[in-house]
Image (tube, grey):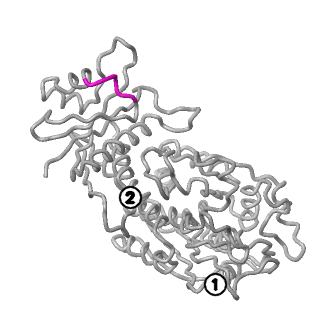
Amino acid sequence: SSSSLILGVYEKQSDNDGIHLTEAAAAFDRSISGKLSEMLSISGPPLKKGKSRIFYGLHQDFPSAVVVGLGKSGTCVCGKENWNNCKENIRAAVSVGCRQLQDLEVAHVEVDPCGDGQSAAEGAVLGLFEYDELKTKKKVRVTTQPYGSVDSAAWQKGVLYGDGQNLARQLMEAPANHITPTVFANSIEQKLSPFAHKVAVHKRYEQMGAFLSVSKGSEEPPIFLELHYKGSLDSAQPPLVLVGKGITFDSGGISLKPSSGMDAMRADMGGAATVCSAIVTAAALKLPINIIGLAPLCENMPSGKANKPGDVVRAKNGKTIQIDNTDAEGRLILADALCYAHSFKPRAIINAATLTGAIDVALGSAAAGVFTNSDWLWERLHKASIVTGDRVWRMPLFQHYTKQITESALADLNNIGKYSRSGGACTAAAFLREFVTADHWAHLDIAGVMTNKDEVPYLRKGMSGRPTRTLVEFAAGLASEP
């Protein structure tokens, strides 16, 4: 079947301006003697950003062409929004065009790179993703390629970034009876198989009393997944260690969650999904950096073997923890993983976790919360997030919060703050910090960005896979530093 085309148009800077097409769209317009700009002006008001208009029969090679609005050209990085407007506009516009053509059952689309092939490719790949593996009726599979003379390396990089986030989305969206700890680990291992010469995969757990206490309530065996990506020419280069919470289903345990919306807890392994997907992407990009990924994988289920409120367990560093709420389990499995992370003498440790409902109350889905002991690390994470448009925002790590989790009746630490709900995201972060001695550590609480309704225009409704691209961009930035 024939291709369709997606072309970009900018908003006019002033009323007496003509139609402002992208470079590729202008070339297309010239090839059909100005028919495109003529159609645009007679078909309605100027296209607003993120809106589209479809034209038929303009060119013999393309039965249909969708023109998409890119907003105003010009200044890109917005200090107030903390992202690059131009890149976000391209992602959103391209995704709109791709979806419109997918609805028309067009199988192949050529995409105007809009001056930024990477962002255009991300918009196409992210915009077309839908988890329909378990449905009989599936959407048409659309293949995309850049239109016109193009920097194919930038496009290909965008495809890999998009694929990385889509891998995380697929793992998060899939039901918990399909993605068990074992299946999760096997899926990632299989994704890494093309890079076997640079990657080692281990499954282990030694002296992880906190992690194993959570897993023992479930019939599913736990797995501690350990990934080693050796991208640096210097094998002795200290690694970046990424740690991800991998609760493949969170019922809350004995402190059972309410049943309404509990199905979303199939995505409580979002930290592990984003971290492992970022490592798969780093390998695909051949980033010259050493990265280690750690993902404690298990279910949190109520049973006769499960943790009970008031139980005390011992973490890998010897600290004892009173479990007052079995639904504050993410911090327990991360405690052991963070202890273990230090054994690799890392350059930095970043952990990601759908840790608290409280971060969603604080930030909603605008940004992931970052709690860090390192300005150096924050600057780099923040810079990466401006490029990707997948934002992070810094939160406080005050002693005030530490005090609330260190006053336990029975143990060294309590797994919930003594004022229970107040500052819940902050007390959770303070708890994690008790297992960190490294100078450069950041905790990303990604519970608020776990799902997308319609806030991110280039992601369909469902599990978001955020902030995978920001982790990849951060790693790429670190790899390019001397």
Magenta region:
43-48
The secondary structure type at the circle numbered 2 is: loop
Q: Residue at x 30, y 58 (%)?
A: 139
Q: Badge 2, how many Cα within 10 Å: few under 14, some, many 20+?
A: some
Q: Is residue 467 left or right of residue 313?
A: left
326 lies above or below 1: below
Q: Is residue 178 above or below residue 29?
A: below
| Relative image position of residue 350 (x, y in whole percent) | 60, 60
Residue at the extreme right: 409
Most distant residue in the top direction = 16
Q: Tell which of 325 and 434 is nearer to you.
A: 325
Q: Amino acid at mark 2?
A: Glu
Helix, strand or loop at label 1? It is loop
Whether residue 412 is visible here, answered yes or no, is yes
Q: Which residue is mark 1?
A: 206
- Residue identifier under label 2: 130
Neighbour tally class for label 1: few under 14, some 14-19, many 20 plus, Cα within 10 Å: few
